[in-house]
């Protein structure tokens, strides 16, 4: 009986040399990549070395504060408005899969006392990440509930200390037409730029998201770092940010420069003010059939309505 | 042996029209309609309707330019298939999308220019579909042709409906304007070819060109 369990000495010649098992791992990695390519085409991390940690698609039963369930990881990562890659929402995931999000720096400057360029890893270390479950309402009248991870924009801006002249914040997306083929289109004034008034930027809801569903952001969702302003139409939530600039004047924004009569600087979700060509009074929650009523400020009025006291939101749409 | 009664062109038209519908149903049943399935259905049926409409307008130019007369006999099928997809498109919009909430629907349709033009285009297609049968052709005589020339109006309206559903500005050529403009350009060309002096010039030009082709008899 016992000799069954007796340890057998292993001759050193039988031990697999390190180079061989390493290359076996590479082989396995490659095999995993190939095998999972079909399954994970959309949610696969861009770098192959992350594939070996491939986890099952994350799921969640979490809800937002109104009791609506978060959308599936699959929907969030396969239905993307990201014109830098494609105007076809379903084509973005595949086109974005080779987008390089590392190394990545974010330059924070302009009217600040201590301008600084942060590596994305520094930001993850310096600022604690928290989960925020937010509704995202697209100007095209569809919406999702998304569990983001990130830190408040205010916490970053406080580190660089805006001067008293700073009244607005301007954001810019990376410009890499070789990787982002949509940026070769002459029909858009690239790079994407967006802006917030300083008080909007400092509001506690305004998030810089670095992750989603407990995972680092994937390229099609704006990796590695993107803005999330949940009370405004989705196009305000600029993706893949490389530059944040404090400025004195209202900055230009991409959609406003394309059609200022349709896409204003404020772009607060407002069911009472229609898009000139379609109604904003209802929306389709992805995953649901039919339509539901849209909420003023996307349901975040309690936290943000006071920012616009005395303003005519029909004029400042 | 009886001769096979269908021409390749006829077969191609029927296969296109029905396979697109089968694919649509298949994707709907198997859950392959994107995360926003109703919008996907609306956009796909809309694209098929506009494509078939454009093809129906191509028939006359093919005859004018190449003396190929068979397409003239296929206009009815193309037009009716365009109407079929337009109908599915409208039914999905009214039923699946708006849950037949008529007051909201009507309010929406009268307020939004893109829906106004879409609705007019669809309404104008109805009499054309009804009168597309031979009995009506006989009964209406000369007026049948006049009636069916409404399609010259319907096509631009449909392009406008498509253009206005996209985010962009056509005057400054900014935003998502490329595809609607391509459809618009094609339709413009097909309509320009029909303008009598232009058609005459094209006919005489193509007659001379075709005469140069060896062994080609012009029917």
Image (cartoon, coloured by chain):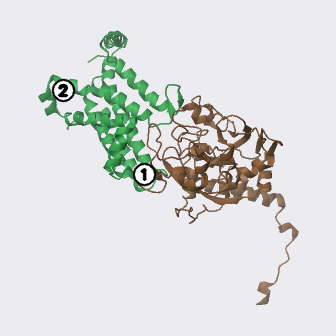
Per the image, the residue denoted by label 1 is: B27
Using the rendered view, name the quadrant where residue B175 is placed.
top right
Name the subunit of mark 2. B
Q: Do tag 1 and tag 2 residues touch (Cβ < 8 Å)? A: no
Outermost residue toward the bottom? A1
Residue B48 visible in the shown view = no
- As helix, strand or loop, the secondary structure at mark 2 comes to helix
Colour representing chain A: brown
Per the image, the residue denoted by label 2 is: B144
Please determine whether, in this image, residue A244 is positioned above or below residue A153.
above
Name the subunit of mark 1. B
Give the spatial CA distance, label 1 vs label 2. Answer: 39 Å
Label 2 crowd bin: few (<14), some (14–19), many (20+), radius 10 Å: some
Please determine whether, in this image, residue B38 is positioned above or below residue B113.
below
Q: Earlier in the sequence, mark 1 or mark 2?
A: 1
Quadrant assignment for the C terminus of chain B: top left
């Amino acid at each position: 009986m016992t000799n069954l369990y007796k340890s057998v000495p292993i001759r050193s010649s039988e031990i697999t040399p390190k180079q061989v098992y390493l290359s076996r791992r590479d082989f396995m990695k490659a095999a995993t990549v190939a095998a999972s390519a079909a399954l994970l085409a959309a949610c696969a991390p861009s770098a192959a070395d992350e594939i070996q940690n491939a986890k099952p698609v994350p799921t969640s039963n979490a809800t937002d504060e109104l009791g609506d369930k978060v959308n599936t990881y699959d929907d969030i990562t396969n239905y993307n408005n990201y014109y830098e890659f494609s105007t076809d929402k379903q084509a973005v995931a595949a086109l974005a899969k080779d987008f390089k999000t590392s190394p990545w720096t974010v330059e924070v400057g302009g009217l600040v006392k201590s301008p600084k360029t942060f590596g994305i890893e520094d930001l993850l270390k310096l600022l604690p990440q928290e989960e925020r479950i937010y509704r995202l309402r697209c100007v095209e009248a569809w919406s999702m509930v998304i569990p983001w991870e990130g830190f408040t924009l205010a916490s970053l801006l406080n580190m660089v200390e805006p001067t008293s002249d700073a009244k607005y914040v301007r954001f810019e997306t990376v410009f890499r037409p070789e990787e982002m083929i949509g940026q070769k289109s002459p029909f858009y004034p690239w790079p994407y730029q967006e802006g917030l008034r300083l008080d909007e930027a400092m509001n506690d809801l305004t998030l810089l998201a670095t992750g989603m569903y407990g995972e680092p952001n994937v390229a099609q969702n704006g990796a590695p770092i993107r803005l999330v302003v949940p009370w405004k139409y989705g196009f305000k939530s600029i993706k893949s940010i490389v530059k944040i600039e404090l400025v004195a004047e209202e900055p230009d924004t991409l959609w406003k420069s394309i059609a200022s009569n349709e896409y204003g600087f404020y772009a607060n979700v407002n069911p009472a003010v229609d898009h000139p060509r379609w109604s904003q009074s209802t929306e389709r929650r992805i995953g649901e059939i039919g339509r539901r009523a849209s909420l003023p400020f996307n349901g975040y009025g309690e936290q943000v309505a006071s920012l616009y006291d005395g303003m005519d939101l029909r004029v400042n749409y | 042996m009886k001769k096979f009664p269908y021409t390749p062109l006829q077969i191609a038209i029927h296969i296109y029209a029905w396979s697109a519908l089968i694919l649509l149903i298949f994707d709907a049943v198997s859950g392959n309609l994107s995360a926003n399935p109703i919008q996907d259905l609306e956009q796909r049926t809309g694209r098929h309707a506009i494509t078939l409409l454009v093809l129906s307008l191509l028939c006359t130019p093919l005859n004018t330019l190449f003396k190929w007369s068979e397409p003239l006999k296929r206009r009815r099928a193309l037009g009716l298939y365009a109407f079929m997809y337009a109908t599915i498109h409208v039914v999905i919009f009214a039923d699946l999308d708006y849950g037949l909430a008529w007051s909201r629907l009507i309010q929406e349709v009268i307020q939004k220019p893109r829906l106004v033009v879409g609705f007019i285009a669809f309404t104008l297609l109805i009499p054309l579909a009804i009168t597309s049968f031979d009995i009506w052709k006989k009964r209406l005589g000369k007026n049948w042709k006049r009636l069916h020339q409404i399609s010259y109006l319907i096509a631009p309206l449909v392009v406008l409906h498509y253009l206005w559903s996209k985010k962009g500005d056509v005057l400054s050529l900014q935003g998502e304007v490329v595809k609607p403009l391509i459809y618009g350009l094609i339709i413009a060309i097909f309509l320009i070819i029909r303008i009598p002096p232009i058609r005459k010039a094209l006919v005489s030009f193509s007659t001379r060109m075709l005469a140069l082709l060896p062994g080609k008899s012009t029917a």
